Amino acid sequence: MNSKSVLKRPVFVIGFMGSGKSSVAATMSKKFGLPSIELDAYIEQSQGQSISQIFDEVGDAGFREIETAALADAASRPAIISCGGGIVTRPENRKILQEHGFTVCLDVSADEAASRIGDFRSRPNFQSVEHASRLLQERHPLYEACADAMIDTNGKTIDEVADELFCLLESKGIIEMSRH
Ligand code: S3P
């Protein structure tokens, strides 16, 4: 008899740019066979434009409208949903995160985020380490307010964080093993 991991509810992965949200969600999918949705990729696909092009065309406020619609759409699916770093800036998004699933914040310092990202050009809101550091300070209380759990990712590999997240979700009964 084989066993398979099953996700009982949506799991939102939030945190600052460079915290590893997308890579951790992809690893959870690959390693444990869990469904995953990368919200920025979902937006790019539905809009037929890159995130940078969307920012150039409609700015941060326009992007946030599109992001809220994408989040509302994804929120009913039992998947690991990795969200963009600014998802917590809108009250309506915070409400969805708090009411529709289990939310995990991946914590990272601005310095470590910068070294992971390398080339900032694909991230319109990561302009320099100094700017990112101020933005992170501003957003941190919002991440804390939305998160059911925090995982410190500083100095850890993606694989280590994915394993930690898996154990956490198992301990909360959000991942169950089904035998077939
Ligand atoms: C943003 C983070 C990005 C993307 C957009 C805006 C932000 O996602 O949604 O560039 O304001 O923090 P990542 O956190 O996946 O880089």
Image (tube, rainbow, N blue to C red):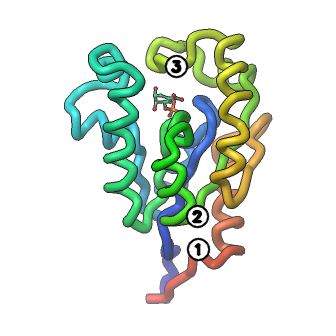
10 Å crowding of disc 1: few (<14), some (14-19), many (20+): some
Whether disc 3's CB lies below 8 Å from ligand 1 is answered yes
- Give the mark nearer the N terminus: 2 vs 1: 2
Find the distance from the CA under tag 3 to the CA under tag 2: 26 Å
Residue at label 3? 125
SS for callout 1: loop
Point out residue 12 in the picture as x, y percentages from the top left corner: 53, 55
User: Compared with residue 143, is residue 76 higher up or lower down, i.e. above or below?
Assistant: below
At horizontal 72% and vertical 20% (from top left) the residue drawn is 133
User: Compared with residue 25, is residue 23 higher up or lower down, i.e. above or below?
Assistant: above
Disc 2 marks a residue whose amino acid type is Phe
Quadrant position of the C terminus in the picture: bottom left
10 Å crowding of disc 3: few (<14), some (14-19), many (20+): some
Point out residue 49 in the picture as x, y percentages from the top left corner: 25, 26
- Give the mark nearer the N terminus: 3 vs 2: 2
Please tell me which residue lies in front, 118 or 96: 96
Between disc 2 and disc 1, the foreground one is 2
At horizontal 30% and vertical 18% (from top left) the residue drawn is 53
Find the distance from the CA under tag 2 to the CA under tag 1: 8 Å
- Give the mark nearer the N terminus: 3 vs 1: 3
At horizontal 48% and vertical 20% (from top left) the residue drawn is 123
Residue at label 2? 102
SS for callout 2: strand
Are the residues at dot 3 and dot 1 in contact (C-beta closer than 8 Å)? Answer: no
Are the residues at dot 2 and dot 1 in contact (C-beta closer than 8 Å)? Answer: yes
Residue at label 1? 174
